[in-house]
Each structure stands twice: as C-alpha cells, then as structure tokens.
Image: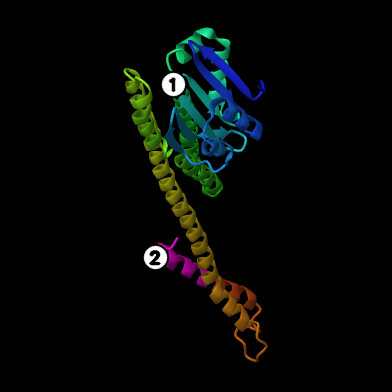
C-alpha cells in the first residue's frame, strides 16, 4: 500500500480507507481489494464533477461536489469527493483539497476516542460526520460572501460606485459557483437516506440525516437571498453610475450652450468689414466683453429658473 496516498483507520471491524490522491495506481488498488465497479472507479478519475448516488450489489457509490474558498484569489472552486459505502467499510477518494475532510481524518487517526466515536458504529455514521463537518465548513464561506456584500454597500454609499463594479462581479461569480456546487445536495442526501435503509439500521441516525438535509436547504436559501441581494445592489450601483454620468453630460451641455452665443459674437466682431460696430470706439473691447458677459449671465439666470442645474 502507498502510505502517502492511501491510509486506513479501523475500529470494531469498521474500516475507513482514505485515498487522497487519484492515479491509476490507487484505482487499481481499490479494484483489486474491493472489486468496485469499473465505471465507479472511472468516475473517480474523471474531472466531469457530476454529483450522483448509485447502489451496486454490496456497496453504495456516491459522488459529491464541495466548495473551496481561496482567500488570495477570492474565488470559490469545486472539488469532488467520492464515497464507497459498504456494510463494514467506507472509502473516501479525493484530491487532498478539502480541508475539513483532511482535518477530520487526521483527528480520527490521532485521537482514538474520536475514532471510536465516529467510526465504530457503522460506515453511515461516519458519512454523516464527514458531511456534517463539510456543511459546517460551508457556513463561514456564506459569512464571507455576506461580509463582502456589506462592504460593497458601504463603499457605494461613500461614493465609490465605479470601484465597486469589479467587486460586485467577484461576489456574483462566487455566489453562482456556490449555487452550482450545492444545487444537488438536497437530492443526493434524500436519496442517501432511502438507499441506506436497505443497507443499515438507521434508527436515530435518520433524524440526524434529516437535520443535515435541513442544513443543506438553509445553505441553499441563504445563497438565494445573497443572490437577490447582490442583484439589487448591482442594479442600484448601475443606476448611480448612470445618474452621475448624466449629471456630467448635463453640465457639459450647459457649458456648451452658454459658450455658443459667445463664440458667435466673437466671430462676428472678428470679421474685417467696414463700419463694424465698436471698431473705432476706444472702449470697444470692453463693451464687447460686457455684452458677452451679459449674455452669459442671462443664460445662467434662465437655466437656474428652469432648474436645469
């Protein structure tokens, strides 16, 4: 066995085999030891990332997608975890990217009391514990998205609408990615409850699985609320940008209108024709400037009365 990629914990004849790297070698090992169906093993190798759950002879195959949030990139990306659930074993296959799964396996490996608590009952108890840990990991991501939206709102109020366009797109992208990842959770867990009743005696565990189902629904509804909120903020931000742009265009238009008659007057008095008014008057230049100033002042007064600015 490759100790770096395949590790095992055993308690009361219940085994948890954790495969944290997916190559042909690991797939061949699982095929030889557990005789899993080749299509399920190929799904582990595939990067298609399509959630599914299937019952096959003496085990249940479940493929699920979970979110990972990269702080530096400020981006949510999907990662796949494949579960092979048997009557006395659980095999998890992943790419060593999901922090809560890695930490939970290490905890059970180091602390025998935790291993006894989660592994010794049945594989489905262990599956529940893993999914619960991952669901708890999703909640801070929701808090991060909520915090990002609050920061955007504050900056828009402060007048940084243009700077927030990119921030809004980042948050929208993450919400869409999160929703795409979690949209199958309710269906997968609902089917897991039904299929597991044929393999295990769920008893009180069914209540916890139902609770997990409710948690996934809460995550979905929270994402819907965040999606609606960011859409509203984007609309408001675009309206503010358009309003400010219209104000700038209006001011520039008023300036152009004021200078239009001034340009006309200056062109008329610049013509070299005989008997031009004020051409021989020693105060002609001052008179022309006064006329232009008067015209400008009159236009400004008219614009003010019409409340154009």
Q: In the shown orientation, is residue 219 left or right of residue 255?
A: left
The magenta-colored residue range is 294-309
Q: Quadrant of the C terminus?
A: bottom left
In the image, residue 244 above or below residue 36? below
In-front residue for pair 162/71:
71
User: Which circle's residue, 2 or 1, is located before the other in the chain?
Assistant: 1
Q: Residue at x 65, y 92 (%)?
A: 274
> Looking at the image, what colour scheme do you see?
rainbow
Question: Which structural element holds mark 1?
Answer: loop
Q: Is 291 one of the magenta-colored residues?
A: no
Q: Main secondary structure of the magenta part?
A: helix
For mark 2, what is the residue?
306
Residue 225: where, in percent of width, then height? 38, 39
Q: Is residue 21 visible?
A: no
Q: In the shown orientation, is residue 213 left or right of residue 144?
A: left
In-front residue for pair 13/33:
33
Residue 179's tag is: none
Which quadrant of the view contains residue 207?
A: top left
Circle 1 Cα neighbour tier, 10 Å, few/some/many (<14 / 14–19 / ≥20): some
In-front residue for pair 284/11:
11
Q: Residue at x 56, y 71 (%)?
A: 259
For mark 1, what is the residue?
87
């Amino acid at each position: 066995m490759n100790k770096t990629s395949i590790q095992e914990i055993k308690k009361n004849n219940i085994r948890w085999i954790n495969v944290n790297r997916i190559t042909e070698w690991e797939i061949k090992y699982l095929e030889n030891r557990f005789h899993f169906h080749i299509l399920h093993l190929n799904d582990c190798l595939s990067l298609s990332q399509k959630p599914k759950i299937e019952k096959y002879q003496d085990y249940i195959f479940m493929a699920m997608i979970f979110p990972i949030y990269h702080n530096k990139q400020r981006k949510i990306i999907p990662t796949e975890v494949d579960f092979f659930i048997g009557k006395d074993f659980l095999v998890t296959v992943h790419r060593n990217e999901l922090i809560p799964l890695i930490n939970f396996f290490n905890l059970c490996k180091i602390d025998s009391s935790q291993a006894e608590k989660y592994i010794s009952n049945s594989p489905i108890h262990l599956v529940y514990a893993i999914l619960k840990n991952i669901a708890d990991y999703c909640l801070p991501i929701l808090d991060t998205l909520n915090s990002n939206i609050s920061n955007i709102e504050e900056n828009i109020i402060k007048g940084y609408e243009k700077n927030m366009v990119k921030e809004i797109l980042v948050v929208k992208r993450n919400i869409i990615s999160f929703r795409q990842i979690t949209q199958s959770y309710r269906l997968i867990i609902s089917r897991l409850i039904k299929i597991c009743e044929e393999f295990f005696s769920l008893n009180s565990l069914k209540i916890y699985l139902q609770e997990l189902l409710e948690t996934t629904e809460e995550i979905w509804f929270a994402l819907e609320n965040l999606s609606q909120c960011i859409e509203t903020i984007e609309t408001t931000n675009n309206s503010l940008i358009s309003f400010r742009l219209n104000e700038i265009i209006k001011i520039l238009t008023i300036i152009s209108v004021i200078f239009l008659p001034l340009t006309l007057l200056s062109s008329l008095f610049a013509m070299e024709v005989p008997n031009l008014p004020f051409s021989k008057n020693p105060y002609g230049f001052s008179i022309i400037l006064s006329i232009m100033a008067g015209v400008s002042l009159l236009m400004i007064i008219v614009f003010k009365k019409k409340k154009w600015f």
